[in-house]
Image (spheres, rainbow, N blue to C red):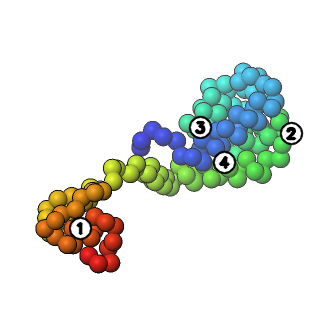
Amino acid sequence: MSGELPLECTHLARELAGLRASTGLSLAGLAARTTASKSSWQRYLGGTQIPPPELVTELCALAGEPPARLLALRELAELSRRHPQPRPAPPTPAGPAPRPRPDPACGRSPSPGHACRSSVTCFVRSQGCSQLA
């Protein structure tokens, strides 16, 4: 595994941390009022482990929040761990614009002001008229 947490786990961890913050409890205080230890809470709030549903319910009760939404997020995080999906590759920046191809009539690259006297096609193209070329 790449070491990156699934987005669902990161989202759950942020929500749990927000709930903990709303209680005003430190990790030690949270451990004293729930069935999990301080080190377990560190793992849950850091997203490296997913808390059991009972613990999510305990935290919601301390924060005065209904547990349904966080239990749903917990389930999504659990599923993302069991069935990881590859993240899409980031878009690659566009490279430099392709260079214009040399004109077959004279072999020179078209550029503003380029007018090959030996080729009517090259001259017409240099003037911006593609219908005659």
Q: Circle 2 sits in a helix, a strand or a loop, which is it?
A: loop
Element type where label 1 sits in the image: helix
Inspect the image, locate mark 1, and give the three-letter code of the amino acid beneath it: Phe
The quadrant in which residue 101 appears is bottom left
Q: Earlier in the sequence, mark 4 or mark 1?
A: 4
Reply above or below: 52 against 40.
below
**Nearer to the camera, 3 or 74:** 3
- Whole-percent x and y of residue 132? 29, 78
- Of the two numbered discs 2 and 4 on the same chain, state the one appearing first in sequence: 2
- In this view of the protein, can residue 101 be seen by the observer? no
Residue 94 position (above or below residue 38): below
Residue placed under numbered mark 1 in the picture? 123
Three-letter amino acid code at the position of disc 2: Gly
* Image x and y of residue 121, in percent: 21, 72
Q: CA distance from mark 2 to mark 4?
A: 18 Å
Residue type at tag 4? Arg
Q: Is residue 20 above or below residue 119?
A: above
Mark 2–mark 1 distance (CA, rounded to whole Å): 79 Å
Secondary element at image label 4: helix
> What residue is pinned by disc 4?
74
Residues at discs 3 and 4 in contact (Cβ within 8 Å): no
Q: Visible in this render: residue 16? A: yes
- Other residues around mark 2 within 10 Å, as few (<14) / some (14–19) / many (≥20): few
Spatial separation of the CA atoms under disc 4 and disc 1: 69 Å
Tell me the residue at 79%/40% (across/down). 60
Is 95 placed left or right of 30 in the picture?
left
Sooner in the amino-acid sequence: mark 2 or mark 3: 3
Question: Disc 3 versus disc 1: distance between alpha carbons?
Answer: 66 Å
The residue furthest front is 117
Which label sits on residue 64? 2
